[in-house]
Image (tube, coloured by chain):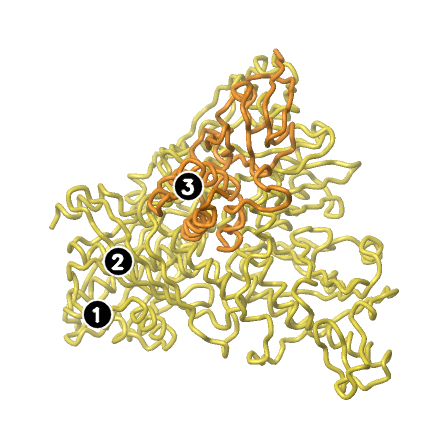
Amino acid sequence: MEEKIIFKLNNKKTELVTDPTQMLLWVLRNHFGLTGTKYGCGIGFCGACTVLIDDEPVRSCMIPVSDVAGKNVVTIEGLEKKGKLHPVQQAFIDHDALQCGYCTPGMIVTAVGMLKKNPSATRQEIVAGLEDNLCRCGAHMRIIDAVEDASKAMKGGK
Amino acid sequence: MKKISVSSGIRRRNFIKLFGGGIFVFFQPWNVLDLMALPADQARSLTKDYNAFLQIAEDGTVSCFTGKIEMGQGIITSLPQMMAEELNIPIAKVKMIMGDTELCPYDAGTWGSLTTRAFGPNMRAAAAEARAVLVEMASVRLGVPASQLEVRDGVVVDIKNSAKSITYAELAKGQKLEKYLDPKPLPEDYTQYTYVGKPLMHSDSYEKVTGRAKYTGDLTLPGMVHARILRPPSHGAKLESVDVSGAEKIEGVTVVREGDFIAVISENRDKADLAIVQIRADYAFNEMKVNDKTVYDFINKGEFRTNVVRTSGDIEAAKLQCEKVFESEYHDPYLAHAPIETHTALARFEGDKVTVWASTQSPFGLQDAIVRELGMTRENVRVITPFVGGGFGGKAAYQQGVEAAKLARLTGKPVMLAWTRDEEFFYDTFHAVSVVKVRSGIDKAGSIQMWDYHVYLAGTRGAETIYDVPNARTTSYGENRAAYRVHPFATGPWRAPNNNTNTFARETQIDIMAAAAGIDPLEFRLKNLKDEKMIACLRSAADKFGYTPSKGPSGRGIGIACGTDAGTWVAEIAEVEVDISTGKVKVRRVVCSQDMGLCVNPQGALIQMEGCITMALGYTLTEELKYEGGNIADRNFDTYQIPRFSWLPKIECVILDRKDQPPQGGGEPAIIAVGAAVGNAIFDATGARMYRVPFTPERVYNALKML
């Protein structure tokens, strides 16, 4: 049975009539064409599908789309503001903090969510915050450096 | 040797039609190394036919067409560096067109750290000849002898009168010129490089941090459906009966069947996921009686084809002369590749022709497989490779591309097939299990006099000793899937294929001898080495580490290992902390020194070294595939643990300055020595010797109890 779901997607009001049991991941990718959010493991172990729901990093492969009714979903595509990259995105570029790039959107979104909650996260807190996001290429060291730098750049409420 | 005849790519005329005007440089990128890396029955015999290689377009852009693919190793940055160098153009003017079987010259595949060392020289030679052609054209247009011209940033300039000049763009304007080159190796002058040797950041970062980079699964086509395939519960299980009615009842789902090949398709991925589990199927099992615990006995009972790789001196006579003799057996388990992007393919038929977009390291291999399995002609099969989300050798296999093509033909619709994580683990071509047995001996002075090395199943990469030993033998068993079957499932190359195994065994054995001789393990290695490059790497790593000599076990937790891979020399020093109460190992620091000849992109090479060391923590500490016969027990990241942020040691890498040497491989070497360095560090910390990777807390704890 289809249902109308009203929510905000990348800060824009959105209406969708769909099967409410569909996973948010596939709705984002296949209905909205927001393919920056990736499938990695399907059961929340890898973090490649991470999006922000009301600023909280969430694994979209585990969330039925009906759960986001009335909420604000932000994907990797929603982080740029007026053509300017989010400081975390910029820091990933500056630190060359990626290789194949497949886990990158999930890493960035998770880091953005973490810094929203804890803007002055220490290196240890950054490690803990990213611990359940998997990267197989081994970009970890640079990712930690990038997030640490972004956190510094964001100080002052930017 | 069976060879497949070739007629690669679209016809030249079509190529020019497709890409407009300009100057087209065709050449045959024949390369011995590339072909050697392929099993003979998969290698194409290359004809003398030329294929497009690079185009100088009317706007001065130079497009490079290569069968190589980008999977994170950074060649999308380093190849343009080489192009820009030889053509004297700004790097931003180089465009890469990669992994498209219709547009790009044949390439066996992207593996073996071959892109820079084997493909690179071809490309640079062609680019250099292309520059000569352009200068010749400029000479005619400007009325200035070619010897009086030089190229600066894509502009051909008269060195006696710089007002006289013409750009590549102007030369290409209005042209439909084809040049056929026969490039020869270039005389190298490494001191004159502008781009090569400069650290460059990844050129694809912006696309990747914004989510714009398109991987196969991100593509979409009108009328596209998502597919899920019915899979057996275990390898070797045969379908006996099936009831698909449960799946058929789901609205918007169609069941597709051809013999035992059964799939569901839906416009909606969730519905395909829902439907596939509604299919009831019974199987007949024919399990091999072997699992991750019994496999080493199983191997030791086997009879294998023997290959004596090298022999020198007289092992048995030398043994009698040795002061001390050591016999050890090393075990190495199956490993999964586990790229975060699963094998994915999108296939579309248009008439008789199929186009398949696939995450693969071997687009041409997939093309041939579709030709074989679907009974098509090569002209009718096009494979395109978008960004690949990690490969590590696992995407040298391309089963998903064949499956998507089959489904597209059966359904008449474009089919997206993105394997689930479960399928990715099940159909992985795992790093093969192996056993290594070493007998070795030293004299009173601590010189290695005897080395008798037997490697089972892992093959010969990195198997020969790097040490100067008068009496040495290397024997390999069952390297080409011998009659004695061990693997219930597929195996294949895994980053620096099997060199991890061989380096772990050799370097542990060396450490055992050093400790028994009462000699510092660095000094013991230096004493027994003649290889200048290995010596230089070890000294460099020791300098960087701030290493002070001590015989093991010193209690400090420092371990050394070294080796060669893909033409590159590498030495690593690891520092660990061992929790004696649990056996848990924390790697605190890894220092790595590498001689890779001329380094094209030091930034990219550094990132590859860091990646190798980080990935190596997995095979060193946790990764070991659990299975029972053909049933793979590890199906996701909950039980199969790959490295995480908290495991990260401090990583410090040094690339030796060797501009005088040709460039070598960089994507794999630094992974080979981490296992042994960490194992040796555990010994140095505790006195417990590790003979089997991974060093799980349980194994380390048990080794500590044996002390």
Determine which quarter of the picture holds residue B496: bottom left
Q: Are marks 1 and 3 in one subunit?
A: no
Q: Residues within 10 Å of mark 1 (few under 14, many from 20)?
A: few
Q: Which mark is residue A119?
A: 3
Q: Which mark is residue B548?
A: 1
In the image, farthest residue toward the right: B174
| Colour in which the image shows chain A | orange
Q: Name which of mark 2 and mark 1 comes first in the sequence.
A: 1
Q: CA distance from mark 1 to mark 3?
A: 42 Å
Please state which of residues B184 and B90 is positioned toward the viewer in this rendering.
Answer: B90
Is B478 rendered above or below residue B533? above
Label 2–label 1 contact, CB within 8 A: no
Q: Position of residue B280 (x, y in %)?
A: 51, 17
Q: Is residue B319 left or right of residue B303?
A: left
Chain of the residue under label 2: B
Q: Amino acid at mark 3?
A: Pro
Q: Which mark is residue B575?
A: 2
Residue located at (55% from left, 40% from top):
B343
Residue located at (35% from left, 37% from top):
B626
Q: Residues within 10 Å of mark 2 (few under 14, many from 20)?
A: many
Q: In the structure shown, which secondary structural element does the residue marked by tag 2 occupy?
A: strand
